[in-house]
Amino acid sequence: MKRSLQQISESVRARLSGGGNTEISGVASIQSAGPSDLVFVDDLKHLGMALASKAGAVIAGEFAASSTSDKALLISDHPKLAFARAAEVLREDAEDGSNAAVHPTAVVHETVQLGAGARVAAQAVIGQGARIGEKTHIGVGCAIAPGVAIGAGCELYPNVTIYANTSLGDRVIVHAGAVLGSDGFGYVRDRGTGRYEKFPQVGRLIIEDDVEIGANATVDRGALDETRIRRGTKIDNLVHIGHNCQIGENVVIAAQTGLSGSIVIENGAVLGGQVGIGEHATIGEGVMLGGQGGVLPNKILRGKGVAFWGTPAQPLREYLKQLATLARLAKKE
């Protein structure tokens, strides 16, 4: 959808310099941009390249305010963030959103509540009593169990599966192949026979507003209570979150991370790729856990802004000291 630079500047709260009526239809890199594209620079050394590009306009920092180029500029304190917001503005649906649209091959139970502008793609299945919010898009082949609640403005990509007792807030993005609300890995061992018998997995999964979940990620519901992913958290591809986990606000979890059951991740924590965390552990507010870090069961890591590394995870400075000591010992042999 095309937008004028004036509209974009107002939406992203950037100061416009020239070209208010210029129409922009997309975002691009400096190298690939065309006349209707928007690009950004957050460093003075790249400004000349951006101004010389074919882009219709450039988002830049205050360092560009004195530019004498004829190129239209949007001046922002945080050019990269303004660029991301502009991309969202340009992605907005051009339809008026007054009517829901269901593909003829989709199977939608007659009791399903579809909000205005909701769309259900081919071969999706939505069970009895489910609720789909306004302008939410259900992708090809999605399977949504009875009673599931999905908020407004959500995007479910193809082949997402959502089990019963799951609810999604507004503006949640779920990428292809993700499974939400599946049973947790909980068993009780009969000491007499050695057999494992399934522990009840009858809890809920609550995903709050503005969460994004990557492709082929899995999030288990609670065993008896709930698993909860709080507002603004971003989960990468191939992440597993076990039952009863409590994930705070604005947490970032990178690919191939695995969380056992009943883990607490507090607000603003960052988990690198291939992190593994044992059951009942706690990762404190603002903790950064480096790639392939391992946290033992029941362990508590605290220290806002502190980076932890290794297995078992420890503060980065201590970890590097140990590596240096091992290197010195190896040279003495």
Image (tube, grey):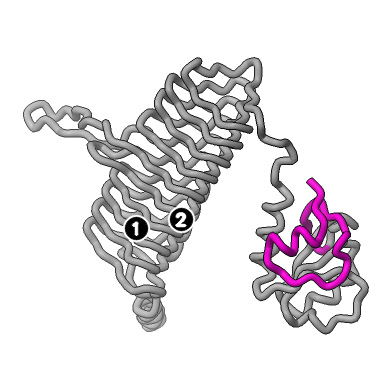
Which mark's residue is nearer the viewer, 2 or 1?
1
Crowd rating for badge 1 (residues with CA inside 10 Å; few <14, some 14–19, many 20+): many
Q: Give the residue at x 32% y 51%.
A: 246
**Element assignment for label 2:** strand
How many numbered circles are shown? 2
Disc 1 target residue: 265
Q: Is residue 16 magenta?
A: yes
**Element assignment for label 1:** strand
Q: Which mark is residue 253?
A: 2
Asked if residue 67 is positioned above or below residue 167 in the image, the reply reads below
Asked if residue 109 is positioned above or below residue 42 in the image, the reply reads above
Please indicate whether residue 222 sits to the left or right of residue 250 in the image: left
Q: Quadrant of residue 115?
A: top right
Q: Which residue is outermost to the right?
A: 70
Crowd rating for badge 2 (residues with CA inside 10 Å; few <14, some 14–19, many 20+): many
Image coordinates of residue 5 in percent, x first then y, are 81, 61
Amino acid type of the residue that numbered disc 2 sits on in the rendered structure: Ile
The N terminus, quarter of image: top right
Front one among 325 and 283: 283
Image coordinates of residue 7 in percent, x first then y, are 76, 58
Mark nearer the N terminus (2 vs 1):
2
- Part of the protein shown in magenta: 1-30
Q: Is residue 333 visible?
A: no
Q: Give the residue at x 79% y 70%.
A: 16
Front one among 239 and 44: 44
Q: Are marks 2 and 1 in contact (CB under 8 Å)?
A: yes
Q: Give the residue at x 89% y 70%.
A: 71
Amino acid type of the residue that numbered disc 1 sits on in the rendered structure: Ile
Please indicate whether residue 232 sits to the left or right of residue 18 in the image: left
Q: Is residue 227 visible?
A: yes
